[in-house]
């Protein structure tokens, strides 16, 4: 994993780009913002940087330092310092070297800081943020403005030295943006072997405007020229607009926000927001609630009002663009790509002026704020050798010259022309007599002095200097030119302006280490306070809600009292910062009791989650064992039932054990035991069934005929037989409809024939469509009679054996076999089959055969009976539904039994085959019930999972609510503390974080 990071330090925000496997990722800070404010805060106890500094700006407005990039190399007596001082709330002082310093109060003492000391602390904080994304980060590449002089760049490197950061190089921001464009849009670029195309980059930053022209192609960037306006940017636009807003505020509300520093900060933040909104809206409401003296400032601002105040500034844009084009010798028409960058490029007037100057539209395909850090990340990979395919050729923005005196005559020599490629080396010759001093400078500043000493001798000296990757001058070597017979060794001293001395470096580094140690201690106190507060809430929730039963009754009362005492102590000292030992001692007191209880509660929770399904599995297994058929198991069935019952009792005992005692069992033991019982159940089901008992001979009872004279008794017997026959006609399933649903009807139960006295035939009540026993006939798929079975006589022992076997079956098995038998028997004697009517719940019409045949006719002419019956009901078909043709031609009275009827007849004649089919049907029914039970268990598990998920969400909501309550209490605490410090009139409003703004700071443009 890469160990480098690209850092873009802007005047307002900083951005971090960490290389990854798929490019360079922008890292978010501790507040999840991709833009980190460029500011630091010094208080009596500690320091804050970046996002935390922004949050404390209103509280410590005198010691919150902003505009750090602008402070680098700022002369105290310059006009820029005077303009800047009108916008800030901290104090600027003049340093001994004439540059600007900052006065802050730290540990109740006023100290003077250099800008590089503040930047060193900011860079260290940025590196810590980068390590959250990649813990291996140890090196950095920092992007700077192209117009920065050698002094600016050395001052930033001094900050790197103070912070002890390994900086590989400084890179121009426009160069980094060009690299980002090449890596982001390779499909728009020429191939590597083709000629490069010109790219115009316009960077409108917060305080300066930079324009660069580059030749680009795939994995290739070459900077040709650059131009800058050091006083044109977003903050300059806001500063020009502020007097108009102040004038309207004073005119309407008679107040001056400059009188109150906090109000002045809020006023500037509102002006910045209005500037952004006017870029897309023609008018906007300028609104600052409770600005001063509980006065709400609000009035309408139009875009024309804003454009009128920045017209002179916008008119300077064409000069910078044309200068860069002229230096590169490229025409506007030849530009292949025009890309606008920076926050100031979002202003509508700036966009219009760019289009007017170039005569064509420009694009904003890159992220206007993050492209510089992303490009710095790619360049960092190239410098470390991780990415070798990228070619980058940068240039120095200024011409470097040297000036020295020879024989009383001052000479000036050009060392490096403007836009020289870096790195580059230059050797020049100078005649030295004893001593000589060479000044190296640019048109903006003096870089340094090279002093050559020959100890009273005279010779020509070759001096070699170089421009490194950071566009800074370095001295390489000095040697005697030509013949050096006297072995003269020149002594050379290179004095650099802006370079920090070793004494000051040690002093600043030591001070930085002391402050860092102090910051770490304060962070530890903050963490201890937060941990103690969280532990108090957790203990109270555990006692009252989460796991009250997990505490031992003897220790619960004492623990309640301890937690309440600690809570009261924390409330009393909420606004005080005590030693860390005070917090840790009370934290350990709560942890000592709470941690074991919490661990025990989590164990029981995990055990109950694992053991809850076991009870259902055991009950299901027990039911299957109880309903299983009799097998040759040698008593295994009874043993298994007892073991399952014992298992359920043991499981209930474990789940009902007291929660304040450590569990003496594990879920694995119960799971393993349940799996063993299930294996025994499976083994039992594979055992053979018990054989049927042998039929026993029963003596036949001969009934004596009764006297004919007993006419009244015969009538009574006939009535009893009719009543008994009606009772035997029980409703049962006589078949299935089209969708498989059962159709109920009454079928007379077969009873053994009674020997009755032959008597005169008597008209009996007809209860069925059958004339004789319904089992003596064959039926088609519609329930119509198609033939008659051969008469078979069952002996009395066979009937008793059948009844005995039926009594041995369970009620469930009897119902199951009755359903199966009725499904095979299609003789719907009471109801006609109408699947659609049965599906939609329509009443079934009772079927009455319009023409009945005598038993003798039905016996000898079954085919004619079937044909006539089917014709009357319009169901005639030669096929019985199973592909069997009856072959009932009119010319042939022969009849062939259907195949399905023959199969049923054979099964009826073969009792073992029928028994085998019954066993198979029972196994299928058991398998269906097992699958149904598994489906119910899965549904129960899913329901339990949903309940657990709802409980988790509820707990998370409770935690968030507690966190919001804690934050609210913390804000109230700070407000009360600072009211006591500041006295009346104190205002705690904090300006909106501009880096969070979706239009100007972070995210895509034009989102409001």
Image: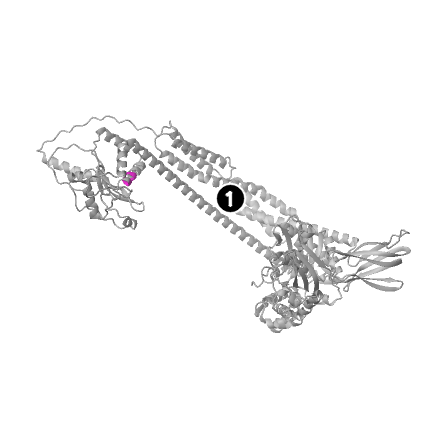
Q: Which secondary structure class fits the magenta region best?
A: helix
Camera-side residue of 215 and 66: 215
Queried whether the magenta region covers residue 143, the answer comes back as no
Task: Decide: few, some or many residues near mark 1? Use Cα within 10 Å; few <14, some 14-19, many ≥20.
Answer: some
Question: Disc 1 on helix, strand or loop?
Answer: loop
Q: Which residue extends farthest front?
A: 891
- The image shows residue 4 at horizontal and vertical percentages of 67, 51
Towards the viewer: 897 or 402: 897
The colour scheme is: one colour
- Tell me where residue 257 sits by quadrant: bottom right
Give the image quarter of residue 126.
bottom right
Position in image of residue 717 (x %, y %):
14, 36
Viewer can see residue 669: yes
- Depth check: give the residue in front, 19 or 7: 19
Please name whichever residue, 696 or 51, is drawn nearer the observer in this view of the structure. Answer: 696
The extreme left residue here reads: 709
Q: Is residue 115 left or right of residue 582?
A: right
Decide if residue 882 is on the left or right side of residue 278: left
- Counting from the top left corner in percent of width and height, residue 411 is at 84, 64
Residue at the disc numbered 1: 547
What residue lies at 60% left-to-right and 48% top-to-bottom? 531
- Quadrant where the image shows the C terminus: bottom right
Question: What is the span of residues highlighted in magenta in the rendered image?
Answer: 819-823
Locate residue 740, reporting x and y percent.
Answer: 31, 45
Q: Count the numbered circles shown.
A: 1
Question: Is residue 113 at all visible to an observer of this figure?
Answer: no
Position of 242 relative to 11 (above/below): below
């Amino acid at each position: 994993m890469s160990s480098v990071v690209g850092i873009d330090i802007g005047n307002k925000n900083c951005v971090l780009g960490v290389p990854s496997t798929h490019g360079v990722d922008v890292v978010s800070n501790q507040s999840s913002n991709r833009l980190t404010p460029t500011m630091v805060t010094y208080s009596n106890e500690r320091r804050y940087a970046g996002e935390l500094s922004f949050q404390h700006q209103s509280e410590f407005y005198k010691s919150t330092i902003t505009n750090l990039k602008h402070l680098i190399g700022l002369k105290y007596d310059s006009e820029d310092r005077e303009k800047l001082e009108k916008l800030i709330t901290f104090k600027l002082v003049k340093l001994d070297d004439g540059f600007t310093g900052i006065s802050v109060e730290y540990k109740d003492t006023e100290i003077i800081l250099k800008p590089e000391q503040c930047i060193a602390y900011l860079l260290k904080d940025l590196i810590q943020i980068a390590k959250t994304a990649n813990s291996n980060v140890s090196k950095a590449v920092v992007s700077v403005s192209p117009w920065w002089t050698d002094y600016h760049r050395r001052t930033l490197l001094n900050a790197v030295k103070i912070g002890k950061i390994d900086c590989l190089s400084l890179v121009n921001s426009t160069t980094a943006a060009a690299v980002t464009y090449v890596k982001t849009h390779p499909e728009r670029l020429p191939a590597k072997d083709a000629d490069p195309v010109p790219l115009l980059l316009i960077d409108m930053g917060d305080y300066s405007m930079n324009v660069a022209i580059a030749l680009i192609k795939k994995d290739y960037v070459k900077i040709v020229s650059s131009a800058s306006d050091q006083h044109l940017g977003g903050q300059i636009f806001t500063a020009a607009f502020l007097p108009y807003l102040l004038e309207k505020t004073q005119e309407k509300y008679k107040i001056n926000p400059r009188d109150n520093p906090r109000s002045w900060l809020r006023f500037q933040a509102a002006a910045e927001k209005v500037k952004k909104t006017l870029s897309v809206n023609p008018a906007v409401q300028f609104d600052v609630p409770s600005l001063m003296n509980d006065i709400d400032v609000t009035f309408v601002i139009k875009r024309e009002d804003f454009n009128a105040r920045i017209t002179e500034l916008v008119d300077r844009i064409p000069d910078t663009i044309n200068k860069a084009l002229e230096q590169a010798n490229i025409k506007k028409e030849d530009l292949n790509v025009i890309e606008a960058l920076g926050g100031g490029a979002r202003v509508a007037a700036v966009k219009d002026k760019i289009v007017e100057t170039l005569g064509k539209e420009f694009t904003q395909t890159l992220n206007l704020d993050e492209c510089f850090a992303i490009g710095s990340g790619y360049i960092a990979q190239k410098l470390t050798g991780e990415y070798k395919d990228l070619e980058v050729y940068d240039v120095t923005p200024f011409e470097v010259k040297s000036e020295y005196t020879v024989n009383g005559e001052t000479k000036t020599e050009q060392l490096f022309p403007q836009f020289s490629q870096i790195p580059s080396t230059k050797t020049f010759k100078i005649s030295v007599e004893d001593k000589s001093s060479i000044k190296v400078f640019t048109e903006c500043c003096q870089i340094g002095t090279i002093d050559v000493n020959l100890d009273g001798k005279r010779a020509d000296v070759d001096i070699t200097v170089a421009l490194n990757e950071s566009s800074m001058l370095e001295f390489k070597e000095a040697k005697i030119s030509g013949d050096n017979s006297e072995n003269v060794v020149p002594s050379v001293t290179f004095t650099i302006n802006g370079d920090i001395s070793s004494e000051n470096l040690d002093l600043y580094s030591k001070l930085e280490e002391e402050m860092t140690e102090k910051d770490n201690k304060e962070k530890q106190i903050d963490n201890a306070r937060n941990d103690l507060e969280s532990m108090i809430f957790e203990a109270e929730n555990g006692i009252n809600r989460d796991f009250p039963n997990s505490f031992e009754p003897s220790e619960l009362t004492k623990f309640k009292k301890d937690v309440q005492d600690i809570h009261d102590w924390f409330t009393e000292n909420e606004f005080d910062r005590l030693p860390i030992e005070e917090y840790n001692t009370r934290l350990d007191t709560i942890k000592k009791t709470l941690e074991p209880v919490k661990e025990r509660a989590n164990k029981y929770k995990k055990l109950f989650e694992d053991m809850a399904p076991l009870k259902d599995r055991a009950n299901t297994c027990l039911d299957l064992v109880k309903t299983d058929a009799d097998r040759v198991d040698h008593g295994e069935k009874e043993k298994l039932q007892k073991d399952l019952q014992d298992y359920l009792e043991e499981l209930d005992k474990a789940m009902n054990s007291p929660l304040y005692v450590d569990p003496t069992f594990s879920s694995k033991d119960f799971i393993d035991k349940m799996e063993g019982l299930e294996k025994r159940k499976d083994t039992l089901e594979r055992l053979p069934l018990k054989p049927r008992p042998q039929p026993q001979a029963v003596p036949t009872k001969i009934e004596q005929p009764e006297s004919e004279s007993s006419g009244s008794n015969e009538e009574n017997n006939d009535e009893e037989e009719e009543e008994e026959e009606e009772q035997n006609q029980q409703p049962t399933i006589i078949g299935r409809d089209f969708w498989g649903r059962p159709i109920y009807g009454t079928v007379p139960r077969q009873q053994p024939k009674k020997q009755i006295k032959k008597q005169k035939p008597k008209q009996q009540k007809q209860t069925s469509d059958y004339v004789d026993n319904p089992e003596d006939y064959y039926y088609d798929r519609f329930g119509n009679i198609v033939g008659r079975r051969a008469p078979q006589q069952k002996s009395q022992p066979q009937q008793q054996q059948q009844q005995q076997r039926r009594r041995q079956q369970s009620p469930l098995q009897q119902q199951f076999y009755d359903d199966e038998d009725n499904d095979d028997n299609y003789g719907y004697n009471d109801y006609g089959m109408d699947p659609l009517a049965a599906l939609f719940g329509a009443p079934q019409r009772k079927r009455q055969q319009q023409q009945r045949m005598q038993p003798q006719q039905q016996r000898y002419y079954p085919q004619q009976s079937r044909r006539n019956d089917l014709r009357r009901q319009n169901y005639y078909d030669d096929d019985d539904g199973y592909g069997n043709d009856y072959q009932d031609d009119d010319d042939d009275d022969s009849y062939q039994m259907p195949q399905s009827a023959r199969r049923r007849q054979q099964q009826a004649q073969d009792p073992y085959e029928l028994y085998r089919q019954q066993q198979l049907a029972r196994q299928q029914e058991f398998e269906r019930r097992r699958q149904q039970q598994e489906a119910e268990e899965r549904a129960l598990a899913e329901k339990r999972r949903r309940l657990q998920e709802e409980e988790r969400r509820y707990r998370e909501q409770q935690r968030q609510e507690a966190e919001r309550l804690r934050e609210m209490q913390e804000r109230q605490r700070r407000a009360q503390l600072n009211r006591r410090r500041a006295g009346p009139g104190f205002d705690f409003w904090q300006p909106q974080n501009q880096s969070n703004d979706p239009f100007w700071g972070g995210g895509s443009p034009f989102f409001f």
